[in-house]
Image: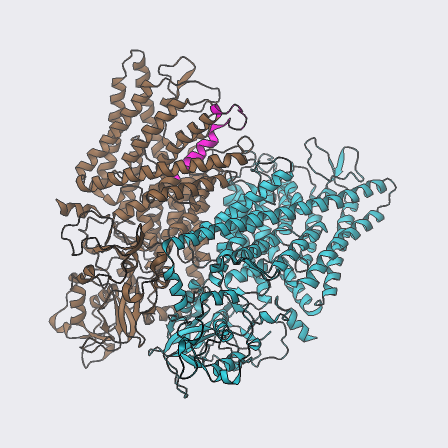
Chain colours: A cyan, B brown
Amino acid sequence: DMANISKKVSWSGRGDDRGERTPLLNGAEDGKYNRHVLCFPQITQDIVRSRPKEIPHNEKLLSLKYESLDYDNSENQLFLEEERRMSHMGFRCLETRRWVICGLIGFLTGLIACLIDIAVEKLAGYKYSAVKQNIEKFTEFGGLSISLILWAVLNSAFVMVGAIAVAFFEPFAAGSGIPQIKCYLNGVKIPRVVRLKTLAIKVFGVICSVAGGLAVGKEGPMIHSGAVVAAGVSQGRSTSLKKDFKIFEYFRRDTEKRDFVSAGAAAGVSAAFGAPVGGVLFSLEEGASFWNQMLTWRIFFASMISTFTLNFFLSIYHGKPGELSSPGLINFGRFDSDSVQYNLYEIPLFIIMGALGGVLGALFNVINYWLTIFRIRYIHRPCLQVMEAMLVAAVTATVSFAMIYFSNDCQPLGQDNTEEYSLQLFCADGEYNSMATAFFNTPERSVRSLFHNPPGSYNPLTLGVFTLAYFVLAVWTYGLTVSAGVFIPSLLIGAAWGRLFGILLSTITSSQSIWADPGKYALIGAAAQLGGIVRMTLSLTVILVEATGSVTYGFPIMLVLMTAKIVGDYFIEGLYDVHIKLQSVPFLHWEAPPTSHWLTAREVMSSPVTCFNRVEKVGRIVDVLSNTSTNHNGFPVVAHTTENDEPGKICGLILRSQLIVLLKHKVFVERASSRLSHRKLQLKDFRDAYPRFPPIQSIHVSQDERECMMDLTEFMNPTPYTVPQETSLPRVFKLFRALGLRHLVVVDNENRVVGLVTRKDLARYHLGKDGLEELHLAQT
Amino acid sequence: DMANISKKVSWSGRGDDRGERTPLLNGAEDGKYNRHVLCFPQITQDIVRSRPKEIPHNEKLLSLKYESLDYDNSENQLFLEEERRMSHMGFRCLETRRWVICGLIGFLTGLIACLIDIAVEKLAGYKYSAVKQNIEKFTEFGGLSISLILWAVLNSAFVMVGAIAVAFFEPFAAGSGIPQIKCYLNGVKIPRVVRLKTLAIKVFGVICSVAGGLAVGKEGPMIHSGAVVAAGVSQGRSTSLKKDFKIFEYFRRDTEKRDFVSAGAAAGVSAAFGAPVGGVLFSLEEGASFWNQMLTWRIFFASMISTFTLNFFLSIYHGKPGELSSPGLINFGRFDSDSVQYNLYEIPLFIIMGALGGVLGALFNVINYWLTIFRIRYIHRPCLQVMEAMLVAAVTATVSFAMIYFSNDCQPLGQDNTEEYSLQLFCADGEYNSMATAFFNTPERSVRSLFHNPPGSYNPLTLGVFTLAYFVLAVWTYGLTVSAGVFIPSLLIGAAWGRLFGILLSTITSSQSIWADPGKYALIGAAAQLGGIVRMTLSLTVILVEATGSVTYGFPIMLVLMTAKIVGDYFIEGLYDVHIKLQSVPFLHWEAPPTSHWLTAREVMSSPVTCFNRVEKVGRIVDVLSNTSTNHNGFPVVAHTTENDEPGKICGLILRSQLIVLLKHKVFVERASSRLSHRKLQLKDFRDAYPRFPPIQSIHVSQDERECMMDLTEFMNPTPYTVPQETSLPRVFKLFRALGLRHLVVVDNENRVVGLVTRKDLARYHLGKDGLEELHLAQT
């Protein structure tokens, strides 16, 4: 059923929540889809031109259902009055509160990371010891099938619980959450993504999926968790808990909330990798457009507190309270700087590894892309999703088991052997099966072993088979309806083939001195693979440097990540971007496509625009807001529109949400009566309604009231940003992106409104293979 | 002579360069200074209201002589045509060129760092061995005065050479250059600051001053050097060498140049501290407003290449070619993570140290502030400046000598003693004088010793006296007419009292276990002192983490830097900001003062504005440009100004520089003749003239030509950003800052020009002790 498909295409598929209706952006007339841009031959027009009834899945579509966040304050009279009333001390107090909130965000994120870490450790520990006992008992009798079944059943059970929670209770908790957070920071409102319920299911789900032995990591979900914590704490209330603490009310608007969510995401990265600086850079790389020093410091503070909290509680858990020097959730171990130096002639090798990582990463993304489309088409029922997740868990267990069974890579148990669950299996006494070790650990531990185990710990065949098997499992796993991240599996695959690469190098060359340590190549391989899959450069470099605790490898890691990005981008975008595109999110990149100087605001804008008069009839407002076929969100307020089509001079901009609040409070001016009859509306009324403004349908306006007038002067933003019609697209784009706008009014040289530019108008243009392409808009 | 004082106040004091005249910003009418803003009582008005003839030094003034950089492209027809002609491939090619330039910037900056490092090592080595020999010879005879004189003379000679170069040949090479680079990145054009000559003198000067034993570092100058390299390389030509390589012509505009200068500054930091990430953050913290991902990656690339180049060449110099693992110019040594952990209960101690650092830093800044004012008043002749520098050098030598002489802090020569110039002096055999060691090393080495020498290497008295002496010397030295930085002296002072703090802790408490290593406290002290003086937070944390090669101390360093900043800000601004204020630079901070919502564009803007018609008489243009009393830089172009005062509708914005080029090429439309008679002007003509456009006086316009007309349509920016008059100051500020504007046109609701907002209009408002204050503008 295609209807169901189009529903599943989006993260906000469960549109049953009345408070979260997602009205279209202004100007999304039907006629728009038919617009031909004949004067620009490079714009491909080979896509369906009429609005399709059944939306086939198509990445050349932009969904109209996503709202934008408004990073631009509506500086209306109420706001200015409040600001002007506030003393210098008041502003200082606000600033202090921001710091306190960031501290809280960091603290809570650290706590959650700690909870996840301990829960996973405990659960995985129980599971491994049960299976190990079982294996050891049965190895003597030669029959391992019972152990296999036990293992597979245990894993599937864990995964089932997690998948059920996600699929039935909160589908938005699926996946790593990083694409969603990227979109949020980019300015797209993804419904339900920063809800407390999402957080709870996410945390529960990730514990289950990691404990269930899937090829997943817990880092992506940590970043999402941090963002949810931030959104919750900064607003001082929770809708899920129906609790309003009546604090931090000043911060109840998109501008402030988005800033805090950046801090939360950074705190999440920081907790996940022990990388506070990497967290800050992640937030900036993904989200920020306007760099503000104080904001960055607050983000950094939240990150630091988060790592600190995690370390503090883990130090207690590990029985060494107060020793804070350990890093984050991931502990890649410390590279001893003396033993693993690199030399000039290794740099070409690193670059080759980077290219390899790029190719393998692109392969990963392509396969996952097709798999995701398959899932969108055929696996959209929750029970099917749970079954798929369980199947993957069982297959993962079986593959691991088979590989352990058929490999006979026995390694001597060293005196400094720190493997917690080393298995003897068919090996001689005093030896252990290294394949079993690789599969019998949480992925983090396996990465660490690959980085740090002494040369000779793994034989090449083991590594090769492991790489292949884990690659397939990881590709299959990402996108399942479980909450799980892709960082650790990527690192693990990369570390495996990197180490293999290092071992091969040392066998090819006779000189054993410099190639001796394959751990170095494991690190580079891990970076290459991760870079090839997710394509972050700056933040990833810093994250890896911080996670390994060594700045020595900064330069090679950067080189490798750059190479991987360049090579990978040749084939396909990064994994997160692939998934964002698959959801048809109107994502704004950093700059307009370079060849878009042809286009001007006149071509880009939506028109005609529905405007309101300064004093407008209530009936007309209700009618416009109720019109589901347009569903505009922002309305220019003009001096006087005559009934004919001549546009009026702009004098402000008012949002749907503001109008809704005005209607709800019946701020009407009855004809020929005093304007002062009603209680004066305050900013507080708007804040209380934020962010889930009621839909227009829930507001009853009587026939008498429809004849009343509403004076919008006090509530509209009197100084919206405007551009003339001749402005080039890159210029419009820059203004829009730099200021985080939601609506940009296009005016003629008489200051009359002629059009409105919104996010989708800008996100439509992108650089394809044949030059500039225009995506089509669709009501998915 | 007060005239001379006002000359010395500014970095661009030597205004003898005709090509570098600094015309006023538009709207800087005399009447402006008299403007009373009566409606806002919190604006203090107690400052001289008439334009002073002799400008007493006053930090409540903003100088009008600084031009702004224009980060906003003038998207005129020529530009749009060029962009439209360019293919997708062309843009890719440009992008590649940007990467190549960043690579070159990194490479050259690394080379310069290498040169400075080796030269300083060599010279200081010769000097120390000469003096040491001398001392050893004379110690036996009890007479040290000859050694003292030798030392003082050697030091003074080095410093004299450096000071002469700076004072007589290029005064802009004085100091660390960081305030100037901060201003440049902020968007203020500081003349001569990115010239090749400045670079040459700077490099030479810093070698002399470090070798001369002054209490200075070579890190600030490295940052400046990187910026100069970037400005030079990216433009593909040098005015000093009168050489145009005819490459990179596309990048000859403020937008591109400023991006490259950011990369250069980052490369400089990276080379100086071995901190590529710190470099990126420094650039962003100081410069960026609009964060662009690709730009950031390029900056990071330049930083990485810079560290890499430095390491590569230093590895050759040190005889281990190809070993790239060593860090930058500074090598703080690696903290072994096992031996120096920190514990929860040390955190309050760290905070106390941070507060102490804040207080000491503020003291440093206050003393240096008064000293700088003294210098501006009385030491403004080059010969006096050279003499002061020599005096400081001699005093530094004497103080050191006296302290070595009177201290008898003998320490045993350990077997792993790595001090290069350890002095026995009056100590027993097998021992060395530790005070002598502290003074007898380059400051970098001394910092490293303080961080890493085993407990007991220094006795408390030595450290106390050393801190005091070095503090005084460093305060005195910063601001001398030599090129030198303040990073290393700050770190050294801090490391000394930090180590002292650590030693005292371990003597107070009986438990020797955790307090045992004073090196940890030396690191924290160094961070506190540096943070107290310069007040950078994020970038400094990362720089210190990278320079020490250990992420373990990230959290305490951040805490300490935050505390130092908060405490220090209570007393006085950071050192660089103090110096920027002393130069009356119109520096734009991140946000408008919070209590400035009272003000709107109407109050802030300059008016009336000189406008031009679309087709304007040449005579009028020449007259307006020649008017030295106004000296506007940007002119709104209006549809038709009538002779009466009614403002015209805006249809564009044209810059002085563009008009000059038009006049030079005589792009005139003769009345009643064809417009196509002259060669079509191209963007290249504008680029060739960039950045030193000839002054209007050098362009001869005959009386006949004065009667011609000029058609500005093709050359003006047809879509300048505009704001309505009611826009609040914070909103104007945000737009201006986010887009890096130079001119922002204020229009009424008919789109008629009513005013112009420039940098100085916004920089004027700042938050003083009594609320919002307005600085006065002065023609210094």
Q: Nearer the viewer, residue A496 or B340?
A: B340
Q: How far across and how far down the image is residue B528, in percent?
A: 41, 37
Q: Which residue is farthest bottom?
A: A644
Q: Residue furthest top?
A: B141
Quarter assignment of residue B424: top left
Choose top left, top right, bottom left or bottom right for residue B41: bottom left
Q: Nearer the viewer, residue A191 or B68?
A: A191
- Residue A704 vs B103, above or below: the answer is below
Residue B611 visible in the current orientation: yes
- Would residue B175 appear left or right of A769 to someone viewing this image? left
Looking at the image, is B1 positioned above or below residue B147?
below
Q: Give the number of callouts.
A: 0
Q: Position of residue A777 (x, y in %)?
A: 54, 75
Which quarter shows the N terminus of chain B? top left
Seen as rendered, the residue at the extreme right is A141
- The residue at the point 79 percent across, 35 percent down is A428
B412 relative to A220 in the view: left or right: left
Magenta stretch, main secondary structure class: helix
Q: Position of residue B483 (x, y in %)?
A: 29, 39
Is B515 magenta? The answer is: yes
Judge whether A724 appears above or below A536 on screen.
Answer: below
Of residues A66 and A778, the one drawn nearer to the viewer in this rendering? A66
Query: Is B13 situated left or right of B292 in this image?
Result: left
* Relative image position of residue B44 (x, y in whole percent): 25, 55
Residue B251 visible in the current orientation: no
Q: Please state the extent of the stretch shown in magenta in the rendering.
A: B506-530
Residue name at image x 46 percent, y 32 percent? B521
Which residue: 68% across, 32% down?
Answer: A416
Left or right placement of residue B168 versus residue A62 in this view: left
Verify whether residue A573 appears in magenta.
no
